[in-house]
């Protein structure tokens, strides 16, 4: 949540600096706090669903509203096609706060989970109008970290160290919604991870802190309060999720010899491409000036969309969590990826990727299953 791309040059390569996450969070707390009940989520693109029965339509609409302005059409399409399931876990209680997990979505690109929180009479639910889980860690049956929050221990570590330790590196957000005078639903949404979410059969979920926050207008800074406990949940992932369909597309034709598509994957909530292209010489010093240009001003790739063989057009997910990005090499090669709203529900045997450059040129890549 509140994640914003921080561009740095490391070993002559541009990468996203995860260690800057918390500083950016503090800067953005004031503006985001005011929008929270307009349901503006800061990170969403992947949904993980888990369990026994499809939600009613109103629940599906709630999930859609959860993502607010950052909802992708791809996620909506998946929800409308029933790709959203309900689960029931045992309620865990600590300090008069009862929590259970009641829904989950799991896909290659998107992950979302809803926690139901019930407060005893000593709490004022209005204090929880902005809340999140800290020290949250979700591990599957192989020991792989499926998701974890960006902890203070990650600050100061290099990208390589974070990757080696297996931490989740994408964007995420928490968003509460009041259900009654003593109950609210806390929704987690995560997306933008460099790796695909694994096809896990079982998830172990644990966290020890709930953080609530209010923005102090007088002091012009956020005020935090913590509730500590020991909440643990075990979830069996339904077969439709760990056996979910993943379609790989291969290149049939490309009109630009400098461009090479390295990966094209279609899953239930999104379509992702990865590619490399050789560009004009880039002045790296532009990135270190007092008024640095965004990488998106420097690189030649400016706009893109995908088209299915039946004529439907799908735009990028355009998430605020950095879903879609580039890195540069000294040889002026751009490693680039983007995620689109296309899903397996719209899959056709052939797909065309259209990319426009800042020189007015169009790169056309034709794909087939």
Image (cartoon, helix red, strand yellow):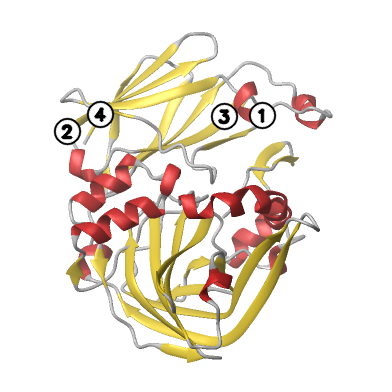
Label 1 with label 3: CB-CB less than 8 Å: no
Task: Measuring from the top left, give residue 126's x and y in whole percent.
Answer: 54, 70
* Cα separation between marks 1 and 3: 15 Å
Q: Is residue 217 left or right of residue 360?
A: right
State the residue in front, 14 or 292.
Answer: 292
Which residue position holds label 1?
A: 294
Task: Name which residue lies at 18% across and 51% down.
Answer: 81
Label 3 with label 4: CB-CB less than 8 Å: no
Q: Residues within 10 Å of mark 1 (few under 14, many from 20)?
A: few
Mark nearer the viewer, 1 or 3:
1
Which residue position holds label 2?
A: 349
Q: Residues within 10 Å of mark 2 (few under 14, many from 20)?
A: few
Task: Measuring from the top left, give residue 187's x and y in whole percent.
Answer: 43, 64
Which residue position holds label 3?
A: 334
In the displayed structure, would residue 335 be above or below residue 150? above
Q: Residues within 10 Å of mark 3 (few under 14, many from 20)?
A: many
Q: Can you say which quadrant of the picture contains the N terminus? A: bottom right
Q: In this view, does 62 lie to the left or right of 162?
A: left
Q: What element carries label 4?
A: strand
Q: Is mark 3 on a helix, strand or loop?
A: strand
Mark 3 or mark 4: whose residue is earlier in sequence:
3
Mark 2 or mark 3: whose residue is earlier in sequence:
3
Q: Residues within 10 Å of mark 4 (few under 14, many from 20)?
A: many
Task: Name which residue lies at 42% across and 24% down.
Answer: 304
Which residue position holds label 4?
A: 351
Task: Measuring from the top left, give residue 263's x and y in whole percent.
Answer: 38, 39
């Amino acid at each position: 949540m509140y994640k914003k791309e921080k561009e740095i040059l490391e070993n002559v390569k541009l990468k996203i600096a995860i260690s800057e996450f918390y500083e950016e969070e503090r800067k953005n707390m004031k503006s985001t706090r005011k929008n929270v009940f307009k349901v503006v989520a800061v990170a969403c693109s992947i949904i993980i669903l888990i369990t026994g029965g499809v939600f009613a339509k109103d629940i599906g609409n709630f999930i859609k509203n959860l993502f607010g302005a950052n909802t992708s059409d791809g996620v909506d399409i998946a929800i409308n096609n029933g790709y959203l399931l309900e689960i029931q876990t045992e309620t865990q209680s600590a300090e008069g706060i009862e929590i259970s997990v009641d829904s989950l979505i799991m896909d290659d690109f998107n992950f979302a989970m809803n926690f139901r929180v019930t407060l005893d009479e000593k709490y004022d639910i209005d204090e929880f109008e902005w809340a999140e889980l800290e020290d949250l860690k979700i591990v599957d049956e192989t020991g792989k970290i499926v998701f974890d929050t960006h902890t203070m221990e990650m600050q100061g570590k290099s990208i390589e160290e974070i990757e080696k330790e297996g931490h989740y590196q994408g964007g995420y957000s928490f968003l509460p919604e009041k259900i009654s005078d003593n109950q609210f639903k806390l929704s987690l949404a995560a997306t933008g991870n460099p790796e695909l979410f694994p096809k896990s059969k079982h998830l172990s979920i644990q966290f020890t802190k709930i953080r609530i926050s209010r923005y102090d207008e007088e002091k012009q800074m956020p005020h935090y309060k913590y509730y500590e406990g020991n909440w643990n949940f075990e979830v069996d992932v339904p077969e439709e999720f760990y056996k979910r369909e993943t379609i790989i597309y291969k290149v049939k034709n490309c009109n630009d010899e400098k461009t090479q598509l390295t990966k094209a994957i279609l899953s239930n909530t999104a379509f992702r491409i990865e590619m490399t292209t050789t560009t004009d010489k880039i002045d790296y010093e532009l990135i270190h000036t007092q008024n640095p240009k965004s990488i998106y001003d420097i690189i030649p790739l400016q706009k893109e969309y995908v088209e299915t063989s039946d004529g439907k057009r799908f735009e990028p997910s355009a998430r605020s969590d950095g879903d879609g990005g580039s890195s540069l090499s000294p040889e002026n090669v751009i490693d680039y990826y983007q995620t689109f709203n296309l899903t397996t529900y719209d899959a056709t045997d052939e797909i065309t990727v259209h990319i426009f450059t800042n020189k007015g040129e169009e790169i056309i890549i034709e794909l087939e299953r």
